[in-house]
Image (cartoon, rainbow, N blue to C red):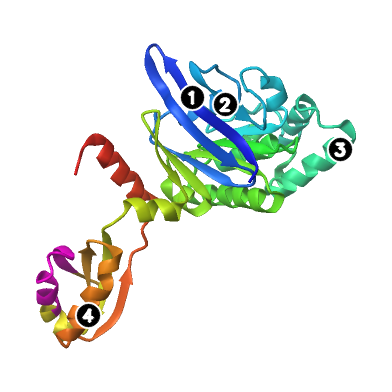
Amino acid sequence: MNTVITINQLTRCFNGTKAVDQLSLEVHAGEIFGFLGHNGAGKTTTVRLLNGVIEATSGSMRVLGLDPQVDGPALRARTGVLTETPSMDERLTAWDNLSIYADLYGVPRADVRQRIEELLTEFDLADRAHERVGGYSKGMKQRLALARALLHKPELIFLDEATSGLDPISAHHVDELIERMARRENRTVFLTTHNLVEAQKLCDRVAVLEHGRLVALGTPAELTRQYVHRLDVEIEVSEGQIPVAQGVLRSLPEMVLGEPARTNGALVVTINRHESIPDVLACLVQNDIRVYRLASQEANLEQVYFTLHEEKEGVQ
């Protein structure tokens, strides 16, 4: 498997405080790699390090085989970056903004018009191409910034909180564009976010950062299996059997945690682990309770994140 980013014991200090602390990981070609953490966890600092914008205090890194601290300009010619607050000249049109950056990125002049037309069409901006960017919504500006980051067909793109502050529809649109770009064009995406729903939906693998340190790494499925043990299960029985079912569930404290709750005509219980579901169901059936439906809520990255945060803070 081709490795695009290699980080080894990377540390960056600001006034004695470690913003990034002994970080080690790899990112593989063609994957959407999620870099998760709360505000101030060190995500943006890591992106700046990987792009050669700032220097590391210690440790090493390679991006596309290059050292960002030595080969910054050569590296940035092969990568694209989209930040939470992209700087666009709002006095100019979308077309003019892209034309200027095409020149800065060294896009061959013969290819500029076609490339801009392709991107504006791809990002649903073609009909507003000759309007000033100052009149765009935030979602439109973010789509334009993503188009700008792709002008020179980078091999690797860094998206730093790309949907932060967007309304749900605009954020969904940007997410669709990111996924389409990664899957269809086989680009590698390094996505920093604190939006766990977005990461769950888009990412092949994720790393979780807490106060500059890596605390978890794996696919969303691997992390949920590793860190999420309790799960909520909805059990539908007949209305007349609900009190009996509640009594049976209360008699299983080693498997059923807390009080069974009634909601929408069903019982919702917290079960200690996924493997206990067949045993709980068997106990209900043995007590002549007819179960019409049993559905467990899917474990997700949000549960993983809060579990890790509680462990870090010493909360059990």
Task: Specify the quadrant of the image occupied by residue 109.
Answer: top right
What residue is rendered at 40% in x and 50% in y? Answer: 223
- 127 horizontally vs 217: left or right: right
Q: Residues within 10 Å of mark 4 (few under 14, many from 20)?
A: few
Q: Are marks 2 and 1 in contact (CB under 8 Å)?
A: yes
Q: Nearer the viewer, mark 2 or mark 3?
A: 2
Neighbor class of circle 1 (other Cα within 10 Å; few <14, some 14-19, many 20+) is many
Q: Earlier in the sequence, mark 4 or mark 3?
A: 3
Instruction: Tell me where the magenta segment starts and ends, as one range.
Output: 245-261
Looking at the image, is mark 2 or mark 1 earlier in the sequence? 1
Q: CA distance from mark 1 to mark 4?
A: 51 Å
Image depth: mark 1 or mark 3 in front: 1
Q: Which mark is residue 61?
A: 2
Circle 1 SS class:
strand
Query: Which mark sits nearer the N-terminus, 1 or 3?
Result: 1
Q: CA distance from mark 2 to mark 1?
A: 7 Å
Going from the N terminus, do you reach mark 2 or mark 4 first?
2
Q: Is residue 170 visible?
A: yes
Residue 224's disc number = none
Which secondary structure, mark 3? helix
| Tag of residue 10 | 1
Q: CA distance from mark 1 to mark 3?
A: 39 Å
* Amino acid type of the residue tagged 2 in the rendering: Met
Q: Is residue 184 above or below residue 296?
A: above
Q: Nearer the viewer, residue 299 or 253?
A: 253
Residue under label 4: 282
**Labels 4 and 3 touching (C-beta < 8 A):** no
